[in-house]
Image: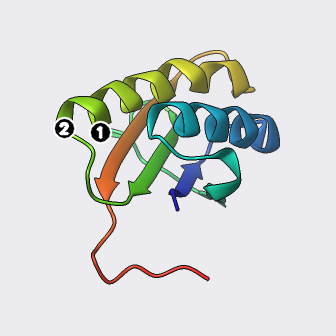
Amino acid sequence: MPQITVDHSAPLDRRGFALALHALVAERADTTPDACTTRFREVAEAVVGDGSTRNAVVHVGIALRFGRTDDAKARLSKAVLDLLPRYLGAAGGVRLSVEIRDLESCYRKR
């Protein structure tokens, strides 16, 4: 059920991150790792701020079925931010962000 999208312009151990992320989301969102699906989209170019420095970005979007409190979503997003650096190939200059949102009521899965 968790639908995860990772947009990244920084080198990233995608498989390692996805497997660790699935375990984390399962623990924090009361689901199973098998229910998680992660898609990666490599960003060819990202401009950060005024463009005076070359920063890389990683944005993780996690969509969950309705029912988690704002506090639970905030704790999950912090845990994802804490997990991400372990799987980055770049040492610094990477902007990290996470968004946890509710899936629409029309969401279906087969």
Classify mark 1: helix, strand or loop.
Answer: loop
Discs 1/2, front: 2
The residue depicted at 58 percent of the width and 31 percent of the height is 24
The residue depicted at 59 percent of the width and 57 percent of the height is 43
Label number found at residue 97: none
Classify mark 2: helix, strand or loop.
Answer: helix
Q: Residues within 10 Å of mark 1 (few under 14, many from 20)?
A: few
Residue 23 x/y as whole percent: 65, 34
Q: The residue under label 1 is which amino acid type?
A: Asp
Residue 76 x/y as whole percent: 40, 31
Q: Which residue is mark 1?
A: 50
The residue depicted at 54 percent of the width and 79 percent of the height is 109
Q: Work out whether 64 lies above or below 76.
A: below
Q: Is residue 72 left or right of residue 11?
A: left
Evaluate if marks 1 and 2 touch, with contact meaning CB atoms under 8 Å apart: no
The residue depicted at 58 percent of the width and 17 percent of the height is 92
Q: The residue under label 2 is which amino acid type?
A: Asp
Residues at marks 1 and 2, CA–CA distance in whole angstroms: 32 Å
Q: Is residue 92 left or right of residue 91?
A: left
| 98 or 91, nearer to the observer | 98
Q: Residues within 10 Å of mark 2 (few under 14, many from 20)?
A: few
Residue 58 x/y as whole percent: 53, 40
| 96 or 36, nearer to the observer | 36
Q: Earlier in the sequence, mark 1 or mark 2?
A: 1
- Give the quadrant of residue 41: bottom right
Quadrant location of the C terminus in the rendered image: bottom right
- Give the quadrant of residue 44: bottom right
- Give the quadrant of residue 38: bottom right
Q: Which residue is mark 2?
A: 70
Q: Work out whether 20 lies above or below 45.
A: above
Q: Work out whether 33 lies above or below 79.
A: below
